[in-house]
Image (cartoon, grey):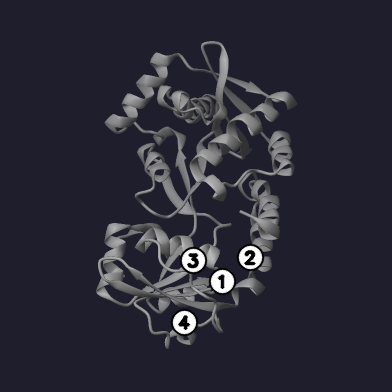
Amino acid sequence: MSGLAARIEERLLVPTYGSRRPFASIAAHRSLALPLQLSGPVRLRTVAADLPIRVAGIGRDKLIGPFVARLLGAGPVAAAGPRRGLWRPAALAGLEADLVVAEVHRWMAPRFRRAGWIIVPDAVRWTGELSAVPGPTPPRSLREDLRKIARQGFTLEQSRSAADWELFATRMVAPQAAARFGDQAWIPSPRLLRELARAGTLHLVRLEGRMVGGSCSVPAGDTLWLPLLGVLDGDPALFRRGASLAALALPIAWARAQGYRRVDAGRTGPFLRDGVLQLKRKWNLQPTADPLAHVMAVLARSAAARAAFGREPVLIEDQGGVRPFHGTGP
């Protein structure tokens, strides 16, 4: 996130995910987004995948550009052209492109879905019943991960101390985000961290007597939301020893012991081959629509464009919820 839109969205995170009544904050988010998503500039580019694919993007390139780059590979920077309306699929019918990607408002998305477009969110949430996370028969790789955590001797403690929150924010969350996303990393603002500290609990992971990682949680009725996680200084050696896994697994066990029924383990992008997404699936967490995510209406008009989704499948939103899309089927 960046700029004014990011600051506004940050203010809605705790009211949306840390509340049993998120309806007002969701409605506010959609009302604020509407004027920005009624029209957008057209950008045309040709990306050389197996075959050259002509792409038309309509809307903000900071949303559409990374999606197209992940799906097809990096292409030329596209200049902004004339604006088109984004409330009717027919208004985009004349674009000559193999792949059309339009940033649409959530209130307009059903129109595009009915017209045969797929709806791809920029993020999905991962939730699950704690009785089934990870379930009675977790995958072998997860069983090995859990055994590694037990062998290493990680322990968990809870804290509300301001000094511990400062350590968590500056030495764990920020370095891990920077290590993973570089210049594109989202670093929570001091204001958001103060909100999380007021509403939630800090979980600190120790190994051999020192803090090596942590996460925080915010309750929402019988659900525990885990918004942030980090490893001390983003240290690769601590990752190899399992500190990041411990910062997820131990709070989940704590939530179960405290009597929570569900866990919300945060969001990922929509691409199924993403490593963090695969980790959440391994825990038997289920993808659900994120009410604060932005969505793109996507129309693949050629065999080459559809084949790209076979190589890089995504999660899409339809009337039944969230499901995988591999380039075939409705």
Marks 1/2 in contact by CB < 8 Å: the verdict is yes
Which mark, residue 107? 1
- The nearer-to-camera label among 4 and 1 is 4
Amino acid carrying label 3: it is Ile
Amino acid carrying label 2: it is Arg
Look at mark 2 in the image and give the residue it sits on: 30
Mark pair 4, 2: CA separation: 20 Å
Precedes in sequence: disc 3 or disc 1: 3
Marks 4/2 in contact by CB < 8 Å: the verdict is no
Mark pair 1, 2: CA separation: 8 Å
Image check: 100 left or right of 108?
A: left
Marks 2/3 in contact by CB < 8 Å: the verdict is no
User: Which residue is more in the foreground, 320 or 80?
Assistant: 80
Marks 4/1 in contact by CB < 8 Å: the verdict is no
Farthest residue toward the top? Answer: 209
**From what the image shows, is residue 76 above or below residue 203?**
below
Precedes in sequence: disc 4 or disc 2: 2
**From what the image shows, is residue 24 above or below residue 59?**
above
Residue drawn at x 49%, y 41% as measured from the top left: 180
Amino acid carrying label 4: it is Pro
Look at mark 4 in the image and give the residue it sits on: 89
Quadrant of the rendered image containing residue 177:
top right
**From what the image shows, is residue 28 above or below residue 140?**
below
Which mark, residue 64? 3
Q: Indicate the secondary structure of the residue bearing disc 1.
A: loop
Marks 3/1 in contact by CB < 8 Å: the verdict is no
